Amino acid sequence: MVALPIRIPDLPSMDNDRLYTFCVYNPELKIERNHKGELLIMAPTGGETGNRNFYINGTIFTYLKQNKTQGKFFDSSTGFLLPNKAIRSPDASWISHERWNALRPEERKKFVPLAPDFVIELLSESDELSFAKIKMEEWMENGVRLAWLLDPFDKTSYIYRQNQKVEIISGIVTLKGEDVLPDFRLDLSEVYGEV
């Protein structure tokens, strides 16, 4: 399965505030907008993917409790307004305190008008790998410093870094937050193992 674009006749006149309101009125839908202005509505995840996401977010929560001064983490419901005008929602993301604090209070309440520093995307049963890779490239082109695409079906991790070739790692390993999140670790045994 792949997310198909939805074309709404007055979509070009739907500014970011109207799109935000549209999303508020349809909370059961996960809605993104690509750089062409097309809406993408994603299917909800299945139980196994939901369980994997829960583990990832639990690991992030534990890290955050120990490193409160590092920045802000966000869940999959958070929309980011990217420089290319797309609105995307990664499965998990992080922004440094410095960049978060530079935002005006009203900018923090709706779609966050910047690309995160760090992004995690977890492939689900309804995702297509080729589409997910395109989305990862978009994250990087819009300023993300480090991004992980996790494929639990092939037990493969795709590590994206600024101005570098994608690193592909097979198997169950522990991923590190590198210079973006120096003390952050994600043990993939729970993500790629039995759920």
Image (tube, rainbow, N blue to C red):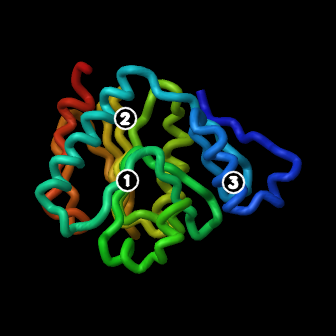
In which quadrant will I find the N terminus? top right
Q: Are marks 3 and 1 in contact (CB under 8 Å)?
A: no
The residue where tag 1 is placed is: 74
Q: Amino acid at mark 1?
A: Phe
Q: Nearer the viewer, residue 170 or 26?
A: 26
Q: Amino acid at mark 2?
A: Asp
Element at label 3: helix
Point out the tag, 2 or 3, that comes first from the N-terminus.
3
User: Could you classify mark 2 by the number of other residues whose Cα lies within 10 Å: few (under 14), some (14-19), or many (20 or more)?
Assistant: many
- Report the residue at 38% width, 68% height from top: 162
The residue where tag 3 is placed is: 19
The residue where tag 2 is placed is: 151
Q: Amino acid at mark 3?
A: Leu
User: Could you classify mark 3 by the number of other residues whose Cα lies within 10 Å: few (under 14), some (14-19), or many (20 or more)?
Assistant: some
Q: Nearer the viewer, residue 41 or 168?
A: 41
Residue mark closest to the camera, 1 vs 2 = 1
Quadrant in which residue 193 is drawn:
top left
